Image: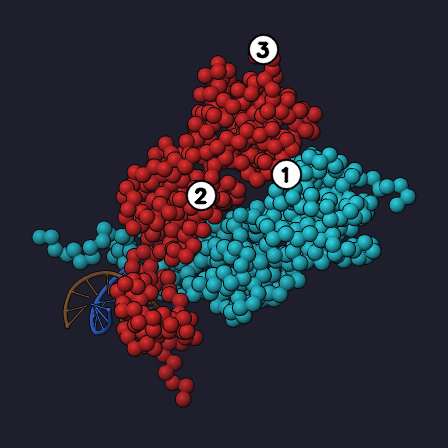
Chain colours: A red, B cyan, C brown, D blue
Amino acid sequence: MKGRQTRGDKSRVTLSDVARAVGVSAITVSRALRAPGRVSPDLRARILEAVERMGYVPDLAARALASRDSGVIGLIMPTLTYLPLLDVMTGIEDRLCGSGFGVQYANTRFDQAIMDQQVRMLLAQRPSGLIFVGVAPTGETLTRLRDAPCPIVQISDVRSEGAGAVIGIDTELASRMATRHMLDKGYRRVALIDGRPPGRGLLRREGYENAMREAGLYNPGWEVLDDAPSSVILGSRLLRHILDTVPGADGVLCHNDDLALGILFECQRLGIRVPQDFGICGFNDLDYAAMAQPSLTSVHVPRYDLGKQAAEMMIRAMRGTVPRGEVVDIGFTLFERQSTQRDRPAGD
Amino acid sequence: MKGRQTRGDKSRVTLSDVARAVGVSAITVSRALRAPGRVSPDLRARILEAVERMGYVPDLAARALASRDSGVIGLIMPTLTYLPLLDVMTGIEDRLCGSGFGVQYANTRFDQAIMDQQVRMLLAQRPSGLIFVGVAPTGETLTRLRDAPCPIVQISDVRSEGAGAVIGIDTELASRMATRHMLDKGYRRVALIDGRPPGRGLLRREGYENAMREAGLYNPGWEVLDDAPSSVILGSRLLRHILDTVPGADGVLCHNDDLALGILFECQRLGIRVPQDFGICGFNDLDYAAMAQPSLTSVHVPRYDLGKQAAEMMIRAMRGTVPRGEVVDIGFTLFERQSTQRDRPAGD
DNA sequence: CTGTTAGCGCCTTCAG
DNA sequence: CTGAAGGCGCTAACAG
């Protein structure tokens, strides 16, 4: 008698299996799992015990289909191979871990069109929330998000246009203060370099320009923007470029510590003394900034906390307690280290 | 007459909507989308046109529920903030991009229990495939995977026990050759340091031990293992530790370039000349290894390709054309750079 | 090549 | 606090 083989599969435990075992209806098990308050305590206990014992794991697809909510929070990222963003990610994950929400990454590869497409896809999968990490939605994406069916949090410059809550720093200010610091230290012909970071390039440049203008030293030719991804190698290359194109250059503001490190190595190779002959300021305060020899001045942003708080906002928003326009400035700190500690030239 | 408001939602376009518009049945549209061959060319064209025009996007949850396949490939990673792994990830993503499969990351945080749990969850969601990146499944996970309902590829040491296809390098060999290289260059009291990398620590240590033993120089006290995550800071700290505990140490084999860079910086700080007084060998050949001053000797692994090939194997496996036991050794290269170029002491 | 018939596993009503 | 119906959107499995 092989009979009763109605459902060919090798018995995946379902909600009704559990329900039958406990002697209640499926919906009660469902509620015991998701809305603890709506089931009597001891029934709930029995149910949870059975769930455990039978090894029941909810089928997310079925749940998503029936409830019109995937329980997934989409993280839209411009790249996955950029260390600073990863710290933010980790903060988000740590906060979300155990909250019952899943995380889905969408890698836009710095490409607007891909972002539009990915966001479209994500939205079609009924996400519980969307977090933009280091990119602000623009263009078509922004439009589509105007009346998105889920909360949106974006980690970006506090002044950027937003479709939801915004958390981040004032990039222009950070860049301006870093530049001013170099000027204060007596550097004059300070160049700016930038690779392909996650999109805040414009604001950083603005801060640099503002500080340089205030000092009457602005020169557009001192801005070196490269489309290659930011890296140590790029930094080395760009130093040579600067020395060629900015006569008498005596410092550089880097939009990333990778670049700063590359600059430092290349200076050492060329026999340029840092900080005496040349000042270097980085951005992000990656771990090696403090360890480098000489140590690198850099703008520190509490990235991990940034992620954590963003996730926190998302969770509150999903409970409906965040006004869509909320903006949080998490602040930054300029760590003034050896790479910019030149004594001011006398009489300057 | 407000009538016919049966489905309250603001019209999400469904398969049947498209089907009705074209005048065919739902299943035909479904097939046109997934199995191009099984629908006549011009019907298919009309359908695709309608799909485009109406902005239809498949509901993955419904699809997963009905087909018992989520179309998602799970990537199990020990951490998301370790640069070398990210290159592998990028390779995987690049290959999978456009293949129609989605990618879902599971971060195990170096924790066996979390891995077990995550794999259990993943399996419950009917993944199309599972790729273990830099970790080999063990314990409960391995058992559970024995008769997994989907292909498995693991990126790890070629000799590691596997639940599916394996692709990677011979870690012991790499480590042994790197150690031998240092010995060849005349370094004698070569220490080993390791932080918390994605699990290949044991094999790397084995390679080091084998090489040291062959040379009659093995000393267990020279192995410094730290549980902190590998980082530049850790490298600096460990150099001081080595100088304290290994009298006359003249070199170190690092299990990561982070560590190597930290060692280098600390040497510079302490006035120890590299490579004359002290040799440094790293692992992974991160971009700064070649740029550092002096440049760092390191073991290069084609990580991006590794990822790409792993994804390729996965795709083949999903078509059922990879024997489960397949093992691919992708090889490595030892780049001998300045940090180990000491002239052999005369008479040694 | 195309259509019909039945669910996939869960959750939303709406009743008690 | 619990239960009974019905359907979410899609796709196997057969038919034609």
Residue A133 coordinates in the image, percent (x, y): 42, 42
Residue A305's label in the rendered image is 2
Residue for badge 3: A347
Instruction: Place residue B186 in its image quadrant.
Output: top right
Task: Tell which circle, 2 or 3, labels the residue nearer the N-terminal end.
Answer: 2
Farthest residue in the left direction? B1
The reply to whether label 1 and label 3 mark residues of one chain is no
Q: Which residue is mark 1?
A: B288
Q: What subunit carries mark 3?
A: A
Residue A136 image offset from top left, x and y in percent:
39, 38
Q: Is residue B255 visible?
A: yes
Locate residue A81, reporting x and y percent: 52, 44
Dot 2 crowding, Cα within 10 Å, few <14, some 14–19, many 20+: some
Say what secondary structure mark 1 lies in. Answer: helix
Chain where mark 2 sits = A
Residue drawn at x 33%, y 40% as measured from the top left: A165
Q: Is residue A162 above or below residue C4?
A: above
**Res B39 visible:** no
- Looking at the picture, which amino acid does disc 3 mark? Gly
Task: Pick the residue in front: B245 or A201.
Answer: B245
